[in-house]
Image (spheres, rainbow, N blue to C red):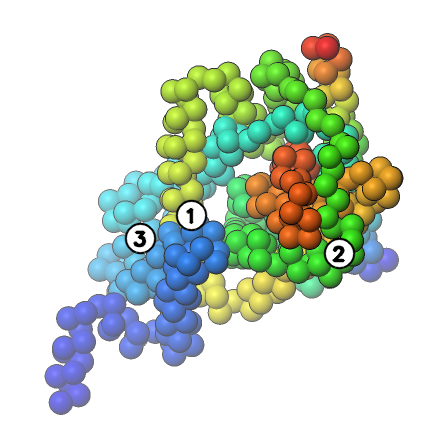
Amino acid sequence: MSTFWLSLKFAMSIYILTAFITLLVLGLVKIIKKITG
Amino acid sequence: MQSFLREFISIFPGIESFLVMEPVMAIARIALILLGFFLCYLGYKKILDPLLMIPMGTGIAMVNAGILVMPNTGELGTMFLNALVETPAEHIDAFQIYFLQPIYALTFSNGLIACLVFIGIGSITELDFFIANPKMSLLLAIPAELGSILTFPIAMSMGFNANESASIAIIGGADGPMVLFAALQLARHLFVPITIVAYIYLSIIYAGYPFLIKLTIPKKIRGVAMDSFSVSRVSSGEKIAFSILAGTVLCMLFPVASPLFASFFLGVIIKESKITRFLYVSDNVLLSGSTLFLGFTLGCLLSADIVVDPNMFKLILLGFIALLISGVGGICGGLIAYKVSGGKINPCLGIAGVSCIPTTAKVAHKCAHEVNPKAFIMPYAMGPSIAGVIVSAIVAACYITMIPKVF
């Protein structure tokens, strides 16, 4: 596989990880809003 | 006559140095001095961000003018700073000669300057609209990070290694301190050109992104007023609770980027705690002071040998590609949000997800306001803009953490 496709695969895994952590942050906001009413 | 002229020129070492350097370098030096003047002019006219361009332009012009044959080494150098010193002993010697060396050694080498800017940014950040609409804010910020992702393989295929490619790709996050911090962590040898390219592009964003919006979003939906989109009130307690919790979790997940997370959320907590003395320090002293020295020191680091490096052209091209892809990604996110919300969300908000707080939020508002004077979307745009800062920090943290494990 060429450098481009290998590095694209890595970059997309970074993107998925970022999206997952972002959803975690979203969950934190939701929890705080629920606790503080 | 010729010897008299040489004797006369030798009185002025800055001019004499032109005669002892290679012609290409001399031409690059003159070009940089002119670039410095031009950046100052653009900053003064407020065409580019004056807070950075005036100190940076001044630094570029003056450091390239003040080159001399150094009495201690016999090589060409300046009295500003020496970025090549490494050992503590060399630093102590350098402190006695170069006036900016203490600032460079104590705040640039370890990324402290980026953290100081981040404390300041945190202390002026309004989290209200982000916490009131976290789903919209964060979901708009994710597509606006596409530039940070897709530029990585492009840079790799252009011959940069993984560390260099990630540092360049982070320009797509449109966050100057983040670019500086990541470049220092991943590709220290390229941090000056990468950061300067990033800051110059970030200044141009305010003029460039409106064209992108006009090209991609139909006029009739650019003016959606968002009146029906309610924003609930957010208390200081909620904002402090979010900041301390999110900061702690993110620091735990990515310890390598914890200085950035800690600095940003500390700034927010200072603001929301309403400790006026701390707020004065973080806003007026830290943010203004560190922005001044960031711009000036970066300018002083831009010497002719960096500009004549063939990689410089690639960096300029990749920086442009990164911000263009992020802008297009943000707009696509905005258009999807518009469709999904049934026309309630203004699609211009998508561009606000490209971090660069508050510039992109202002761009989104400006574009909507031009079409419909009743459309006041600035408060709504601040949510994605703040989310953009958080998401681009997460991307940078992922790159810094993952690259040593994979490559």
Q: Chain of mark 1?
A: B
Classify 10 Å Cα crowding around label 1: few (below 14), some (14-19), many (20 and above).
Answer: some
Separation (CA) of disc 3 from disc 2: 51 Å
Asked if labels 3 and 1 share a chain, the reply is: yes
Give the x, y percent position of residue B63. 33, 59
- Nearest to the observer: residue B82 or residue B60: B60
Residue B200 appears left or right of B42: right
Separation (CA) of disc 3 from disc 1: 21 Å
Q: Residue at x 52, y 54 (%)?
A: B203
Q: Which one is earlier in the sequence, the residue at label 3 or at label 1? A: 1
Please, what secondary structure does the residue beneath circle 2 have? helix
Q: Is residue B354 visible?
A: no
Give the x, y percent position of residue A36. 69, 10
Give the x, y percent position of residue B219. 75, 56
Mark 2 lies on residue: B219
Q: Chain of mark 3?
A: B
Mark 3 lies on residue: B80
Mark 1 lies on residue: B51
Q: Which one is earlier in the sequence, the residue at label 2 or at label 1? A: 1
Pick the quarter of the image with the N terminus of chain B.
bottom left
Q: Which mark's residue is nearer the viewer, 3 or 2?
A: 2
Q: Which mark's residue is nearer the viewer, 3 or 1?
A: 1
Please, what secondary structure does the residue beneath circle 3 have? loop
- Nearest to the observer: residue B127 or residue B175: B127
Residue type at the position of mark 3: Phe
Q: Tell me which corner region of the image, top left, top right, bottom left or bottom right, holds residue B46.
A: bottom left
Residue B235 appears left or right of A4: left
Give the x, y percent position of residue B301. 41, 55
Residue type at the position of mark 2: Lys
